[in-house]
Amino acid sequence: AQSVTQLGSHVSVSEGALVLLRCNYSSSVPPYLFWYVQYPNQGLQLLLKYTSAATLVKGINGFEAEFKKSETSFHLTKPSAHMRDAAEYFCAVSYAGGTSYGKLTFGQGTILTVHP
Amino acid sequence: GAGVSQSPRYKVTKRGQDVALRCDPISGHVSLYWYRQALGQGPEFLTYFNYEAQQDKSGLPNDRFSAERPEGSISTLTIQRTEQRDSAMYRCASSLPDRAQETQYFGPGTRLLVL
């Protein structure tokens, strides 16, 4: 069975500071990994995804994530936080196996607060 | 083009009533997924369709929950005899094919409150 753990349900940073949101996964087969962002009253929006190509993935709004197989991690980073980055972030995993291709398993989410 | 739409956006109902939640996917998307998200949690998989065929319903909590996609486009998630524990955000997503690496596009969700 696959699972996702996001360390820290709330992360607070100052504007201009580094953003680091942690995600660890558990999967018996090579995973595909995703980061989604959720703004209030909106649907989940894809930030970036890892699909077994480059291990360092660049996404929208200046975010990036690195797939580290040895650490079973896919942490999300951004060098300099902006006020508009305040939202809830979800890490998710899927894999091409079984009967549920495309089925996503999500972490519990991390709420990012950005202080001026 | 238009994204995934869901209706109603908010639904308040009394315990014991049936509710129907609608999802209109992006035009041409083959796969459609339903997820449920409790407050403070990530979305949890309920069921998914390829075209009109329901491929996996392993996430449906019990037989009060059912879903259909009769013409391979719009889908309806029905909850019969609602209970307070059914209160949650119900999210729909669609993607082109159902490959695991495909991006799923999410709708805004339907927030269900059962009194």
Image (cartoon, rainbow, N blue to C red):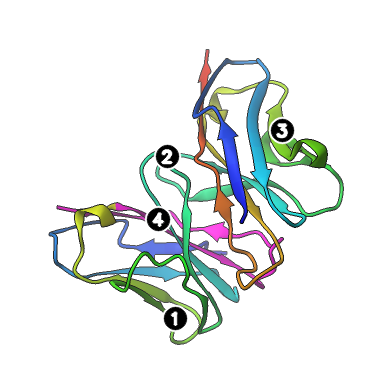
Q: Subunit of mark 3?
A: A
Instruction: Please name the residue shown 36% across and 64% down the image.
Output: B61
Dot 4 falls on a residue whose secondary structure is loop
Check if mark 1 and mark 3 are on a common chain. no
Q: Is residue B78 magenta?
A: no
**Distance from the alpha carbon under mark 3 to that under mark 4:** 26 Å
Three-letter code, disc 4:
Gly
Residue type pointed to by label 3: Gly
- Label 1: element kind: loop
Which region is colored magenta?
B88-115
Q: Residue at label 3?
A: A62
Residue B24 or A7: which is nearer the viewer?
Answer: A7
Picture disc at residue B83 = none
Identity of the amino acid at label 2? Pro
| Closer mark to the observer between disc 1 and disc 3 | 1
Whole-number angstrom distance, CA of label 1 to CA of label 4:
17 Å
